[in-house]
Image (cartoon, rainbow, N blue to C red):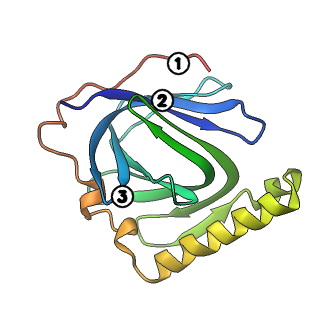
Amino acid sequence: MYPLIRIDKRIPDGSIWQARRAYLLPPIDDWTCVYGPAGTRWSNPLGGWTTEYEGVSIFHPKRPFTISCSGPAADKRFYVDVADGIRVAPDLVEFVDLFLDVMIDAAGVVIEKDEYQLAVLPAETQAFARSARDQIRKLIDRRDVLFDPRSAYYAVPDDARPLPPSAALLAI
């Protein structure tokens, strides 16, 4: 019912920086939603890590960012990747991470990270990334439902909760 698909996060040189498998949930408003149970393995060139908490990530090919929401039930956090080239296929979601990230902690505090890494990108790509970041910040300021952990975007169906995590190390 919920197929296990691969998610590849690439960096601008085209190489894969992170890879994981997650369960494809029904889409919401053209957003692709995936569920990773606690214990899901994220692989990267440095080895990777295993998640402590379940999480839902959402992807839209016409938006310049991806959103992940995870954490304990009463303490959800958001991690937003500024992204380009988001592609959704039946068994794969992939995107190019443009380094700049926006994070929201459980108390609603917003921080950004890695803007200094934009220096290695062409000026046009830097401008694209900063514009995307500004769009994200506006949505957060407006309290858009995309950043509400209780919204339908981050609801995990009851029959998906017992699914096992994908714990295999992925080739990247």
Quarter of the image that includes the C terminus: top right
Q: CA distance from mark 1 to mark 3?
A: 26 Å
The amino acid on which the numbered mark 3 sits, given as a three-letter code, is Lys
The mark nearer the N terminus, 3 or 2, is 2
- Residues 46 and 107: in front is 46
Q: Residue pushed farthest bottom?
A: 142
Q: Residue pushed farthest left?
A: 159
Question: What mark, if any, has residue 170 been given in the picture?
Answer: 1
Q: CA distance from mark 1 to mark 2?
A: 7 Å
Question: What mark, if any, has residue 76 been given in the picture?
Answer: 3
In the rendered image, residue 156, in percent from the top left (x then y), is placed at 22, 47
Find numbered disc 2 in the image and state the secondary structure of the residue it sits on.
strand
Q: CA distance from mark 3 to mark 2?
A: 20 Å
In the rendered image, residue 18, in percent from the top left (x then y), is placed at 59, 33
For the residues bearing labels 1 and 2, Cβ distance under 8 angstroms: yes
The mark nearer the N terminus, 1 or 2, is 2
- Residues 31 and 160: in front is 31
Q: Mark 1 packing: few (<14 Cα in 10 Å), some, or many (20+)?
A: some
Find numbered disc 3 in the image and state the secondary structure of the residue it sits on.
loop
